[in-house]
Amino acid sequence: MNQTVKSYILIHISVFLFGFTGVLGQIISLPAIPLILWRCVLSSFLLYPVIKISKATIWPDQRKMLKFIGIGLLLGLHWLCFYGSIKLANASVAMISLSMISVFTVFFEALFNRARLVIQDLVTGILVIPGVVLINQSLSTDFKLGFWVGILCAALSAMVAPLNKKYLKYSDPLTISWIEITVAAFLFALLTLILSVSEYSLFCWPTRQDWIYLVILASFCTVIPLSLALASMKSLSSFSTMLVFNLETVYGILLSIIILKEHKQLNLQFYLGVILILASVLAYPLVKTSNFKYLKNSKTI
């Protein structure tokens, strides 16, 4: 099988599995911080034996390790905002917030690569604004806060993806996944420890049902999809990766409607906003590709 085709299959599986994270985040009764802590701890323990068995393990040098630690901290903050959005609002609101990742990505890539922002990128950013306004107006005060926390989550995620792509060549996907997840685990363990000596202690043990969902979240919705996504990035461009990851929002919202029945909590105005944002985000890659082909053909005339 062609390596590119294999990478596309891997990333589609990865994105579908990631689509369940919002549903599980809503079902698990823990607050956001202990939920992420247990997710990261379990994921780290599950992934470490796989790394030891793997003969392809490549540990980065000290300098590169610091970069992956930094990315791990960003990943932890991304998860904090994501699950904070779910707990403040619901899974559907958090997932539609994530659709803004592609909008932030084009701006961050221009910033990181010191490149000029092209007109299609700017237009895409402008086109999502009506959808954001519609959704914001349709939500209650608590849900609005969750929505904007989700937007911050999307911005952080848009920073993590290009950085992972940039430094992926210095290690292997499994090792990078383990380093970043373990760093996030230490971050939330430290945060939990600090809060435990104050009146805002959040440490709590999961219930028996929570443990089941946490193991599913850590294995099938963290370790496996993250490793598959990183493995696929070696053969796919950032643009192709972003195109597929746009489907995570679609999967997440559909699963929230089917499993959690969240359509009963949200009104028509919310879903009109969802349609506007998804239309802009999903149309962007098609416009970008068409424009590229047009310019390429123009140069050959």
Image: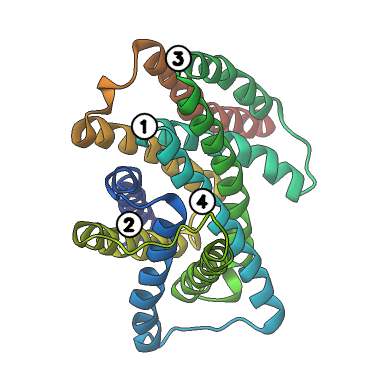
Q: Is residue 225 above or below residue 109?
A: below
Q: Earlier in the sequence, mark 1 or mark 2?
A: 1
**Badge 3 element:** helix
Label total for image: 4
- Give the number of the disc on residue 221: 2
Name the residue rendered at 61%, 75% in the picture. Answer: 170
How far, Cα to Cα, is label 4 from label 1? 17 Å
In percent of width and height, residue 13 lies at 30, 53
Mark 2, Cα crowd under 10 Å, few <14 / some 14-19 / many 20+, is many
Query: Which amino acid type is shown beneath numbered disc 1?
Result: Ser
Mark 3–mark 1 Cα distance, whole angstroms, equals: 13 Å
The spot of residue 53 in percent (x, y) is: 34, 88
Q: Residues within 10 Å of mark 1 (few under 14, many from 20)?
A: many
Is label 1 in a helix, a strand or a loop? helix
Name the mark nearer the viewer: 1 or 2: 1
On-image quarter of the N terminus: bottom left
Residue 298, x across and y down, in percent: 66, 28
Residue 283 visible in the current orientation: no
Mark 4 or 2, which is nearer the eye? 4
| Gap in angstroms between the C-alphas marked 1 and 2 | 17 Å
Q: Out of 189 and 12, give the one closest to the viewer.
A: 189
The mark that comes first in sequence, 4 or 1, is 4
Q: Inspect the image, locate mark 3, and give the three-letter code of the amino acid beneath it.
A: Ser
**Front residue of this view, candidates 166 and 4:** 166
Residue occupying the point 74% across, 50% down? 112
* Residue denoted by label 1: 92
Q: Which residue ends up furthest to the front in the rendered image?
A: 199
CA gap, disc 2 to disc 3? Answer: 30 Å
Which residue is disc 4 drawn over?
A: 80
